[in-house]
Amino acid sequence: RDRGFSGSFAVVPNGVPMPGTSDAGEDAAICSRLGVPARRNGELTCMFLANHTPNKGLPVLLEAFDGLNCPYTLIVGGERRPEIDYGIASATRRPDQRIVVTGRLSDAEVQALFRRSDLFVFPTLADTFPLVVLEAMSHGVPVLASRVGGIPHQLDQASGQLVEPGDARQLRDAVAALAARSDTLPKMGQHARARVARHFTWEN
């Protein structure tokens, strides 16, 4: 319309399948094999999943969590790359703070880790329409992501939150604020799942 088109049109985005049923025993076995510990009371579990190229914001993520002052488990999915410094991930920290770098994951492992997570954190520096955001949402996981590309179209205020790209302090503050009201995350996750079912399935 901005370019003078006056006819009717439809926007057809990429989509994702809605997850099927799960097996709690299989999920627990997968998490144990990947080094992800059992959930502890009062602890926020966050997940990141992407190719570990610098543009996906992994260095920003690690810097943000290195200064976080709350109990957490951060699951970093994806194959390690030589251009990323993983020193922060392996550094000694509080007993109630853990960063687990899993390496390459199968589809079944990804789904089990989504079900284990409270919040998907995706501080990408540049993106178009990342399907991983929709995949997290389809599993009922709210999303904290960068305000870039099509991500603001994927999320709404009920299902996630946006931060400016490349700002580790703002990302840290946003995670801390969500951790302080973690009781709202399940409801945000329900909204996220419903939003995907309504707008972003392959069937739609």
Image: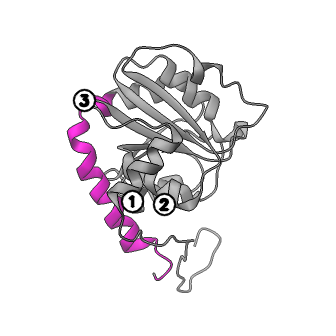
Q: Position of residue 134 (x, y in %)?
A: 48, 60
Contact between marks 1 and 3 (CB within 8 A): the answer is: no
Helix, strand or loop status at disc 2: helix
- Can you tell which mark lies on residue 135? 2
Q: Residue at 66%, 25% (x, y): give it.
A: 86
Q: Residue shown at 36%/73% (left/top)? A: 198
Give left or right: position of 193 versus 168. left
Instruction: Name the residue carrying label 1.
Output: 139
Question: Is residue 146 visible from the viewing direction of this image?
Answer: no
- Residue 41: % across, % down: 24, 31
Q: Is residue 196 visible?
A: yes
Asked if the residue under mark 1 is in contact with the one under mark 2, i.e. CB atoms within 8 Å, the reply is: yes
Residue 137 in picture, x, y percent from top left: 41, 57
Q: Residues within 10 Å of mark 1 (few under 14, many from 20)?
A: many
Which range of residues does the magenta coloring cover? Answer: 177-203
The answer to whether 163 appears left or right of 187 in the picture is right
Name of the residue lying farthest toward the left: 183
Residue at the farthest right position: 82
**What's the residue at 53%, 35% (across, down)?**
164
> Given the image, on which type of amino acid does mark 3 rest?
Gly
For the image, the number of numbered tags is: 3
Give whichever of 52, 194 is nearer the camera.
52
The residue carrying mark 3 is 42
- Residue 111 at x, y percent in the picture: 47, 58
Marks 2 and 3: in contact by CB < 8 Å?
no
